[in-house]
Amino acid sequence: MEHVVAARGLEKSYGRLKALDGVDLAIAPGSISGLIGPNGAGKTTTLKALLGLIDVRGELAVAGRDPRAARHRLMEEVCFIADVGILPGWMTSRQLLDHVEAVHFRFDRGRAEKLLATTDIPANKRIRALSKGMVTQLHLSVVMAIDASLLVLDEPTLGLDIMYRKTFYDRLLNDYYDGRRTIVISTHQVEEIEHLLTHLLFIDKGKIVLDQSLQEMAEQYVEVAVAPDERERALALQPIHQRELLGQLVCLYDGVAKPQLEALGETRTPAVADLFVAKLAGAKNAQARTRNEGGET
Amino acid sequence: MKSEMLRFGALLRKETQEHRNLLLITPLVFSLLALLIFFLLVLGPLRSLGEPALLWAGSLLGNPPLRSAVAIPLMAALPFAAVVFLTAVIYLTVSLYQDRKDRSFLFWQSMPVADWQAVLARAVTAVFVIPAIFAPFVLLCLLAPLLWLSPAMAEAGTGFALGKALLLALNAALLFWCFAWLNGLLMLPVIGWFLLFSAYSRRVPFLWALGGVIVVALVEAWLLDSIWFLYWMSWTARVMVFGYGDVPATLFSYEMFTALALGGVLLAGAALMRRFND
């Protein structure tokens, strides 16, 4: 199977800061991947690299092309929404449709107009006069009317209220995603996109720390709400993360057999946000251990 | 090919729409001011002086053949050339910089338009579109006084009538447009220079561009002990003001070739800068 995104050893530095430190990616067609990481982890840099907006070292192919060689050709197959507010404020939504229709040969104006008809966005009002939510709706309508194979979303709902955020993802899933298209989403609001995702990519300090389908994740990681009398046994199994929830110990395990864990308490698949915290905390602990060991020797 | 032309046409239209205040309101306001001043200072006194003045004007405009007579309205349109130049400089300075300032840059980059196409659209706007927008205003500004004068001049028996007034104004406006883009091509390095700094600078691109000129002149003087760069600047300025000469000769001159080559390099630099300077 040819991957829509295939990257190997991507590296990017800004001065002494390594924004990408050997990033490998293989995104399958038809998947919805969540690129999740803390601030400054390298999410936007990764997405910009995929879109050919920055120069990076390493091997990279997106939709079969090298974005660094011909960004404009790539953009015939790839759509992109950055955080809200990148549409030109001086344009009206009608002028925007006119322009996209003239420059993008895969744009279906009729579809865009149909999508816009379901919103309150006036055709002759300047974009700068629209609310943040309307601008995002407008951008999404334009993007959904483009027959692209890959859609890249970088914090697309940043700063929007919960109604707009929910509408955004509902429309994305119901009116755009058809199982053939590939979507890559980067966001902080993991809980909102968790139900959409088929694939997880965790990034921290420019490195991919988890690259798994949700199905694989559910098989590998198990969370246990430990029964009070099983605490010692639970800790002995070396959870990758533990926390107290309403006085009960909750442990997260990596690769421990499920029957063994079921004996300790109630088991469940961890939420993406919990796994994210566990993996990042784990990485920090491992770094601290390495530093300490280095210091001792 | 046709679709690429359509795409490029859309880029030019977008430039005009985005900078409509600068590109449309400037010639409108300047035309109104020019007409007002011309009527108050030239035409009013000319008519009040009566027949001798009208006969004198007729000897300049009515008697000579069209080819010679057109020089006078063309000279009268000279202030427009200066305004075209200033408008183009302001436009070039802000055009690429504005995209990054208002963050719409990311949206434009999400369209299948190459950086060189985006930069070329700006250069074409400066060289051809801005003079084309100004040309009808020039026509109106020349036509209005000539039409106003023509009945009185015809009455005074100068041989200057409505038909000649129309021909003169139309010829002068066409020549104005023609000389304007010709000068624009000669100034392609200046256009490339401003676009380069518009794509590069994080603030005050005009000062960066101006500072760049000073630095290049100083570096040339220091390293090569020459002032070729300053000479070229003064030559361009001379052509701009006094260059209403032989169009084909200018078009195929060595200076034009040099300007296109150097301008091309600077435009390519601006495209590269746009690509990597987010």
Image (cartoon, coloured by chain):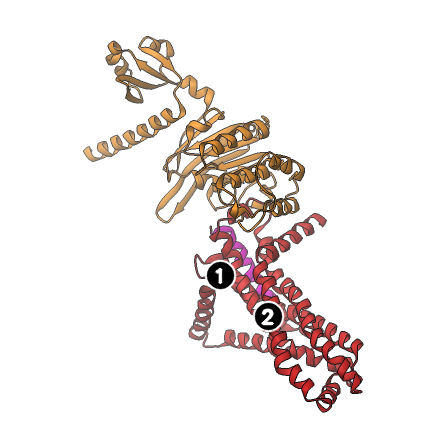
Chain colours: A orange, B red
Question: Which label's residue is closer to the chain start, 2 or 1?
Answer: 2
Q: Which label number is shown at residue B197?
A: 1
| Residue B226 image offset from top left, x and y in percent | 48, 77
| Residue B74 image offset from top left, x and y in percent | 68, 77
Residue at 24% from the left image edge and 9% from the top image edge: A229
Q: Which label number is shown at residue A58?
A: none
Q: Mark 1 lies on which chain?
A: B
- Amino acid type shown at disc 1: Phe
- Amino acid type shown at disc 2: Phe
Q: Does the magenta stretch include residue A65?
A: no
- Which sits in the foreground, A251 or A65? A251
* Secondary structure type for disc 2: helix
- Which sits in the foreground, A239 or B165? B165
Residue A286 seen anywhere in this rendered image of the structure? yes
Q: Does the magenta stretch include residue B268?
A: yes
Q: Which of marks 2 and 1 is in front?
A: 2
Judging by the rendered image, the residue that carries numbered circle 2 is: B30
Q: In this view, does B153 lie above or below A87?
A: below
Query: Which SS does the magenta portion mostly show?
Result: helix
| Residue B97 image offset from top left, x and y in percent | 49, 56
* Secondary structure type for disc 1: helix
- The region drawn magenta spans B258-277
B251 relative to B269 in the view: left or right? right
- Which sits in the foreground, A75 or B153? B153
Q: Is residue A137 above or below residue B29?
A: above
Callouts 2 and 1 close, C-beta under 8 Å: no
